[in-house]
Image: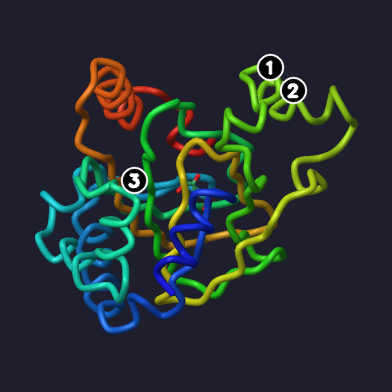
Amino acid sequence: MIADHTDALTHFGFTVLRRAATRQFTVLEDVLTRMRDETAAPLRDDDRLTKFHAVEFDERMTCYREFTALPTLLVHTGATTLVASDINLLRGPSFWHSDGFYDTGPFLRAVVYGEQLDEHTGALRVVPCSHRRDLGWTADDVEQLLRHEDTVGLTGEQVPAHVIRCDPGDVVVFNTNILHSSWGGQDRRQWAWNFAPTPRTPQERADSARYLLNRYVNATVRFS
Ligand SMILES: O=C(O)CCC(=O)C(=O)O
């Protein structure tokens, strides 16, 4: 079972741990309510809201450690260190992007959505295998896909992709190299944790540092 999830992550770049966070879901909802209550500014119609350092904001966000199978999966992939966490109120589409492209890793993101999501309501979409340089993915290919309207005349929604349908309490885990997006949805709640392996070589240390910086500095990881 864990081996299947590890293989899926390695080969295709994503997997879903069904109902792995069901028991912690009420706690997650409470944390998000607190974040919403403590946000001073009223949100405009098209505003999104992100709380970085979510685990530091509220210790209850450490409940990811109790999600069924997640800790074991992380050990199997080697991405055992929590490097960032965030809570998001997402609204509207998230355009195609990758959260950076790294040769080392894997850098993984585990997310729980608060709503039942499918292709019509903003479920996460991925281009399977697009996290893999070993299959020939290059920065050029990624660039072409990001300009899908010009290069192939397709809207973001029409780009062939796998839609990750999910229910509240499912845990979606993906390699953050992967091209991902969301279309067709309106408001969605998302809790997220990012994991990295312990760096041992100079290249791994450089990638880890760049990854961490990107989480906060590079606008692409803010999904739009
Ligand atoms: O669900 C979405 O709208 C996009 C999520 C995303 O890009 C992410 O979690 O990295």
Q: CA distance from mark 3 to mark 1?
A: 30 Å
- Amino acid type, label 2: Gln
Q: Quadrant of the N terminus?
A: bottom left
On the image, the x and y values in percent for residue 204 come to 28, 24
Name the disc covering residue 140, or none. 1
For the residues labelled 3 and 1, say whether their Cβ atoms are less than 8 Å apart: no
Residue plotted at (23% across, 21% down): 201
User: Crowding at label 2, few (<14), some or many (≥20) Cα neighbours within 10 Å?
Assistant: few
User: Crowding at label 3, few (<14), some or many (≥20) Cα neighbours within 10 Å?
Assistant: some
| Element type at mark 3 | strand
187 vs 88, left or right, is right
- Amino acid type, label 3: Thr
Residue plotted at (65% across, 68% down): 118
Q: Quadrant of the C terminus?
A: top right
Q: Which residue is mark 2?
A: 144
Name the disc covering residue 50, or none. 3
| Element type at mark 1 | helix
Asked which quadrant contains residue 60, the reply is: bottom left
For the residues labelled 1 and 2, say whether their Cβ atoms are less than 8 Å apart: yes
Q: Nearer the viewer, residue 206 or 100?
A: 206
